Image (spheres, coloured by chain):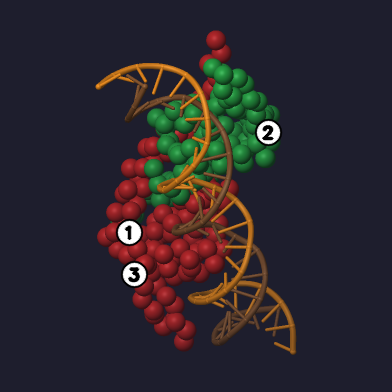
Chain colours: A red, B green, C brown, D orange
DNA sequence: ATGTAATACATCGTATCACGAAGTATTACA
DNA sequence: TGTAATACTTCGTGATACGATGTATTACAT
């Protein structure tokens, strides 16, 4: 998918991925893959940002002797998804405008 | 609209605006306004970029003693819109994933 | 006549952000 | 013994939306 088009979707998609169940970096990438691909450097940048903006919280959990960082969505994160849904109406309006066929007169 | 969300839409929206009729900067902004707002600096940056990538051609036309730069979409520009339509299927898939309700088990 | 808004285009600097490259470290399996 | 998969991190770069600012003309109101 075009990089610019992804910009508005990546962050919200990460939130959606951890919405129902806490998850960690490597798994988030795999879960998102069918819908939208992103590199590790991109994901960890986004996770850090979402943490800074309090959209999620982090907890390190030991797994097989190694630490895994589990991410948990916050109320603000859930609200962010709701806001996205509202904004989507505007996006659809733009799309309709773009695909509108020529009115041959 | 959120800046990030706009990133994937602005360029294509400019092309859609001039698709049926050649237009110039100031008018493009006004025509786009109901769907998506952008500043003059943003638009002229985009127009320059679309010219560089051969998505449109420019022609200066005298109007009321002043020069207006009219922009005309090219074949490549029209193709760009078609490509966007194709890509939209992926965008919708992402959206569906984001709004998917929790499966309470 | 004087001021203000609208029209029309251009440039500069900045902040945000996706991403490739590279690195560290462990586990699993051939 | 080597290679892939797992897991997280840092750094530098390029793309791009946007505010600020500037130039210049026309139109209209005070």
Residue hosting label 3:
A57
Q: CA distance from mark 2 to mark 1?
A: 40 Å
Residue occupying the far top of the picture: A105
On the rendered structure, is B58 left or right of A49?
Answer: right
Which of pointers 2 and 1 indicates the residue nearer the eye? 2
On the rendered structure, is B88 left or right of A13?
Answer: right
Residue hosting label 1:
A77
The chain carrying label 2 is B
The chain carrying label 1 is A
Proximity of marks 3 and 2: CB atoms separated by less than 8 Å: no
Q: Are marks 3 and 2 on the same chain?
A: no
Q: Nearer the viewer, residue D8 or B42?
A: B42
Q: Nearer the viewer, residue D14 or A8?
A: D14
Residue B76 is tagged as: 2
Question: Which residue is drawn at the image coordinates 54% and 67% (left, top)?
Answer: A41
Q: Is residue B66 visible?
A: yes
Question: Which residue is drawn at the image coordinates 48% and 68% (left, top)?
Answer: A44
Which of the two discs, 1 and 3, labels the residue nearer the N terminus?
Answer: 3
- Helix, strand or loop at label 1? It is helix
């Amino acid at each position: 998918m075009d990089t610019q088009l992804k910009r508005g979707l990546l962050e919200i998609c990460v939130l959606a991925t951890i919405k129902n169940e806490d998850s960690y970096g490597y798994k988030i990438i795999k879960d998102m893959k069918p819908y939208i691909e992103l590199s590790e450097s991109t994901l960890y940048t986004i996770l850090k940002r979402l943490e800074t903006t309090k959209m999620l919280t982090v907890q390190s959990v030991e797994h097989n002797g190694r630490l895994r960082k589990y991410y948990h969505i916050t109320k603000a994160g859930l609200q962010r998804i709701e806001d996205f849904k509202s904004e989507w109406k505007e996006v659809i309006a733009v799309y309709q405008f773009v695909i509108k066929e020529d009115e041959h007169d």
